[in-house]
Image (cartoon, coloured by chain):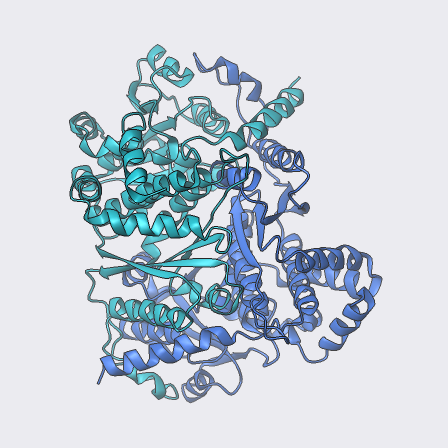
Chain colours: A blue, B cyan
Amino acid sequence: MHYENIFEEIVKEKEYIGYYNLVNQDTNAFKKYAKTVKQKNIIVIGIGGSTLGTYAIYKFLKHSKTLSKQLFFLETTDPIDIKSKIQNIDLQDTLFIIISKSGTTIETVSIFKYINSLIRCDKNNTLVITEHDSKLSVYAKKNDIQLFDIPKDVGGRFSVFSAVGLLPLAIVGIDIDKLLDGAREVYDSFFLKKEFYDRLLKKARFFTEYKNDFNINVVFSYSSRLEGFNKWYIQLWGESLAKIDIYNLRQGLTPIGIIGPIDQHSFLQLIVEGKRDKTVTVIKVENFDSDLKIPNVKLAGLEELDYLDGIKFSCLINKQADATIESINSFDDIPCDVITMDGVCEKSIASLMYEYELLTSLCAKFMDINAYDQPGVESGKVILKNKLKKENR
Amino acid sequence: MHYENIFEEIVKEKEYIGYYNLVNQDTNAFKKYAKTVKQKNIIVIGIGGSTLGTYAIYKFLKHSKTLSKQLFFLETTDPIDIKSKIQNIDLQDTLFIIISKSGTTIETVSIFKYINSLIRCDKNNTLVITEHDSKLSVYAKKNDIQLFDIPKDVGGRFSVFSAVGLLPLAIVGIDIDKLLDGAREVYDSFFLKKEFYDRLLKKARFFTEYKNDFNINVVFSYSSRLEGFNKWYIQLWGESLAKIDIYNLRQGLTPIGIIGPIDQHSFLQLIVEGKRDKTVTVIKVENFDSDLKIPNVKLAGLEELDYLDGIKFSCLINKQADATIESINSFDDIPCDVITMDGVCEKSIASLMYEYELLTSLCAKFMDINAYDQPGVESGKVILKNKLKKENR
């Protein structure tokens, strides 16, 4: 298949796959609602695609902006986790955002039921984001609770730029228009100017052409702020690209997300001396907007490290990234590319995420699979339901 | 190579590889020092093997025990991370524990220098854990700072049951004798009673015999409490088993750690429908010691989920694990085993970690590689040093 064909296929897909066009939506309803929220704490109850993208952006930005509210996530059914997270939050001063695309996600409804036993949830402290015809939307309508829609044609793991991500982020004070600006820049560059197009198509082609040699794709992010992005990438890549193809062959590229410099002390050995089964993408942040530096403090005995004195931490971490890149490239058999983010701001994280969404769609096209479903997890859900119904008989 | 040979090799290794015998050490000096600590906050400054094991145990236990102090970790050179972590801690009421095996870890010394510019670090608020003849030990001795030793024959990633892990954990109020009890049970069972021996050897043999088919080993932990364990496992497995073997061939098994049920919504699709390149080990916690349950709350519209009412969350999460196991086992080509931990207690986490240390040593023996060095990360360190020295000229 030629590049032009792939491009045409993606343009065709834009007609019925909704995430592409979220960059051009009107955000006024989100911003208007956000302004009405009085509560100081925002708890998102959701799991997987309903939380990972929001968390990725929030985690990236929260210490670099002065945000008016705090955002929390209740995702898991681990009882110790639920209890420990809730105990330090004033639930009287909390808005609960219930997010579930299907509307009947077991984890989400279970936790929401539990919250209902602690505090009355009604139109004053509850917000629902779901598909317009789900059971959860029925609940919202019956209780006169504000309801926002997840479009049918936007999959959960591609939903960060829909109400799923934008609404909670707008509520805590993140500039969602700047987020969309960042995503739109990538959209325009890819679809209109086609600048980006060549690089991204080459990358997708490489990943898929050599998928049997390099079945693992490592994202090595040099900032702890990108921990949430890594998790979001793992879902996006793992769920979208693991499918049975049109020839009935199992496909799948395995995502790994690691954080520098911490994981230089954990995973780098595996990259440089391990089996050649991994590609590596290093992500750097050009400008941390921080003056924090290593001071000229003399520690008797440790004088050999005085060459560190006066260096900014932002410089140190980027030199660590560069040293890792150089070290990987000193071998000629580890495919490695570098993405540099401008800064710790809305635009740069949104650009990065939209770029990864596009890359995922492109890889799926090259592999002749559907990036947007997840049939493999359904059978487990049926087994669970039967187990629980038996338990409660 | 036969099982008996491997066992003999491990017994021989016990003579010069120190971690095996940590289960039988005297902990009195640690407990005695711990009692003298008056500060409420404990900050460990370290990275990789100096923090991951401690974090794994602390994260597992902290919400299930009434601990007298809070433990924090400063690991990374990310300036935003350093600043945001420190700003909410009262440094006047903090003990700083500086941990570095080599004594000259760049991240650790950089952060410690920075801390020195914020507060005077001396024998009243600082503790050093390092090799007895390192530069950091010189610093401690010159400044009359309390010093604990990391034995030369105990590698960083195998050091959790040395002063590296036991001392910070004892200080915050975790029962370190019970930790060693848990590790010793596995030791005894493996080396003396040989009960455990067969299962563990079979597992190591399988992982290594089929390493070219299944080059990815997934640990699927069904509790958010095990997030730290997953990270520790990734370092242990990745750094120990990625080596060039005696025939000059690159070896390497890739560790992945995921958390259930959250990652059912992110990674399970890849396990069940993706390429068959993964083994899966599901870890369950039998007893969460929690009565938290889904209440009998009726949500109009969501009646179809009322079968959840009255079920304990601890039961729900374990049924979710069981459903995942059943779903994986419905395919006959995904190798899957299950580890069940008794409860959220010192003994069970220590047993699990010691079991994984043994398993790692066994796999290395089967692969004819040295589990205890990490030559691949050294070249990057040299490149970095040169870059930084140039920066500061």
Classify the position of the C terminus of chain B by image quarter.
Answer: top right
In the current view of this chain or complex, which residue is farthest to the front?
B2
Image spot of residue A357 (x, y percent): 64, 63
Q: Is residue B280 visible?
A: yes
Image spot of residue B324 (x, y percent): 37, 69
Please name whichever residue, A21 or B194, is drawn nearer the observer in this view of the structure. Answer: B194
Please name whichever residue, A178 or A132, is drawn nearer the observer in this view of the structure. Answer: A132
Q: Residue at x 34, y 19 (%)?
A: B122
Please name whichever residue, B183 or A117, is drawn nearer the observer in this view of the structure. Answer: B183
On screen, residue B191 above or below B230: above
On screen, residue B255 above or below A320: below
Locate residue A379 relative to residue A260 in the image: left or right.
Answer: left
* Rendered image quadrant of residue B334: bottom left
Query: How many numbered callouts?
Result: 0
Image spot of residue B80 (x, y percent): 52, 41
Q: Is residue A40 visible?
A: no
Please name whichever residue, A354 or B86, is drawn nearer the observer in this view of the structure. Answer: A354
Classify the position of the N terminus of chain B by image quarter.
Answer: top left
Q: Residue at x 27, y 69 (%)?
A: B313
